[in-house]
Image (cartoon, grey):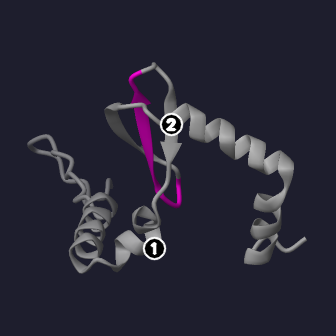
Amino acid sequence: MNTDDPSVLERVMACLAAQLKLQTVRAMLEGRRIKKVEFTNEIHTVGILLHLDNKEEVVVSMAELSLTMLLRDPDIGRQEQYLYEKTLYRPMKRRRQKKGTNSDAKET
């Protein structure tokens, strides 16, 4: 089964079992207020964790918060690259040598 084919999801959404599942989600969300919003790292997207007034939590995703879409923003892309380079190329600390020693000197 090709899950990249949008017609598959259309057929799933037309199923009675899927309709019942969607109705359950609708009942859980309608009439509720969002008390708190958190963001989570879901590897390929920023997840949105909604805390509702009935103590339920819901994870939501938005296309514009996918990693691909975020990196298309020039400011975000540039800043991410800067942070990457900053963590990758940390300057190495030099070891202090004790006075009177020369690490290059050969013993005779």
Q: Secondary structure at mark 1?
A: helix
Residue located farthest toward the right when viewing the structure as drawn:
1
Q: Mark number for residue 43? A: none
The residue that appears at 48% across and 58% down in the rendered structure is: 45
Horizontal and vertical percent position of residue 10: 76, 69
Q: Secondary structure at mark 2?
A: helix
Q: Is residue 52 magenta?
A: yes
Q: What number of labels is visible? A: 2
User: Observer-nearest residue: 31 or 95?
Assistant: 31
Q: Amino acid at mark 2?
A: Leu
Q: Residues within 10 Å of mark 1 (few under 14, many from 20)?
A: few
Instruction: Say whether marks 2 and 1 touch (CB < 8 Å).
Output: no
The residue indicated by pointer 1 is 68
The answer to whether residue 31 is above or below residue 81 is above
Residue at screen point 49% across, 30% down: 57
Magenta stretch in the rendered image? 43-53
Q: Is residue 7 left or right of residue 88?
A: right
- Relative to 106, does residue 82 appear above or below in the rendering? below
Circle number at residue 29 = 2
